[in-house]
Amino acid sequence: MYKQPQIYYLTHEKLKDPAYFKEYIALDMDNSYYWSDDWSIDFYVELALAGFINTTYDTKGGLVLLPELQFDYAILDFKDLHVSKKVKKLLKDESYSFSVSRRFGEVLQNICLQHKYNWLKEEYLALLKNIYARNNEMKNFRIISAEVISKDTNKVIAGEVGYIIGSTYTSLSGFSLKEKKYNNYGNLQLVLLAKFLENEGFSFWNLGHSHMVYKQKLGCKIYERSEFLKRWEKDINLAIINPS
C-alpha cells in the first residue's frame, strides 16, 4: 500500500496563493494528503474549490481535517451512465420516492450508524450542518443530500451527502440499508441521482477515489490529477445550479 513520505500542514494562506498551489501542491505527485486544524467554513470551501476532497483523522491532540488532492478521480459523464438490469427493474417499482435535500439530517445519521470506521464525525458533522444551514448565503457552493425513501415506512433507505460547485457535483459519503429487501437500493440511489444531475444541467459528477468497482460499473472514467484539475477549473466557474 502506498504511503506518502510526510503529511504536511496546510494553511488557508498557502492554499490561497495560486503560485504555491500550482508549483508545490498540484505538481507534487509524491503527496496527496495534507492536514489542518482549521475548521472554518471559508477554508473548507476553498479546499473544495481547489479540488481537495476532505475527510478526517484522529490524532492524540484531537480530530483534524485531512484534505486530499487525489492522484486520480472517478468522473461520471452522464452519457456514460450504465444502469444494471437489477436497477432497471427497481426503476419500474413505485414503492419508493427520490428527493434532494429533504432529509439531510437523517442521511447524515444513517451514514454514521452504518459505517463502523467513519470519518464523518464530530467537527466535520458540525461543519457540514453549518454550511447546509447557510446554503442560501453561499455564492458558489452548496451542500446537498440525496434520498431514496420507502413509501410504506417513510424511512430513508439509501442516500448520500455531497456538494455542488458551479456545474459540478462531488460525493462525500453515503449509505444503504442492509436488509435483504433493500438489495441494490444503493445502486438505485446512484442512478436516480445521476439522472437528476443530468436533467438539472450539471457538467459531471466527481465520485472521488477511482479504485472502487461500483464506480466503474456505474460508467465512471478515471482522470489523473492534472487532467481532472483542467476540467475542474473550467466547470466550477460555470453558473451555479440550484436543484429543486
Image (cartoon, grey):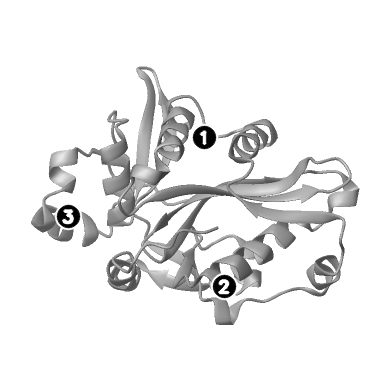
**Residue position marked by numbered label 1 in the rendering:** 120
The vertical placement of 230 against 3, above or below, is below
Note whether residue 21 is visible.
Answer: yes
Q: Locate the C terminus and report the quarter of the image it occupies.
A: bottom right
Q: Residues within 10 Å of mark 3 (few under 14, many from 20)?
A: some
- Callout 3 secondary element: helix
Tell me which residue sits at (34%, 70%) in the image: 235
Q: Earlier in the sequence, mark 2 or mark 1?
A: 1
Q: CA distance from mark 3 to mark 2?
A: 34 Å
Mark carried by residue 21 = 3
**Residue 95: percent from left, percent from top:** 87, 55
Q: Residue 177 vs residue 72: left or right?
A: right
- Callout 2 secondary element: helix
Q: Residues within 10 Å of mark 1 (few under 14, many from 20)?
A: many
Q: Quadrant of residue 93?
A: bottom right
Q: Residues within 10 Å of mark 2 (few under 14, many from 20)?
A: few
Circle 3: residue type: Phe
Cβ atoms at labels 1 and 3 below 8 Å apart:
no
Q: Nearer the viewer, mark 3 or mark 2?
A: 2
Q: Nearer the viewer, mark 2 or mark 1?
A: 2
Q: Quadrant of residue 130?
A: top left
Tell me which residue sits at (47%, 51%) in the image: 1
The front one of 54 and 32 is: 54
Q: Residue 38 vs residue 153: left or right?
A: left
Cβ atoms at labels 3 and 2 below 8 Å apart:
no
Mark carried by residue 97 = none
Note whether residue 7 is visible.
Answer: no
**Residue 32: percent from left, percent from top:** 33, 51
Cβ atoms at labels 2 and 1 below 8 Å apart:
no
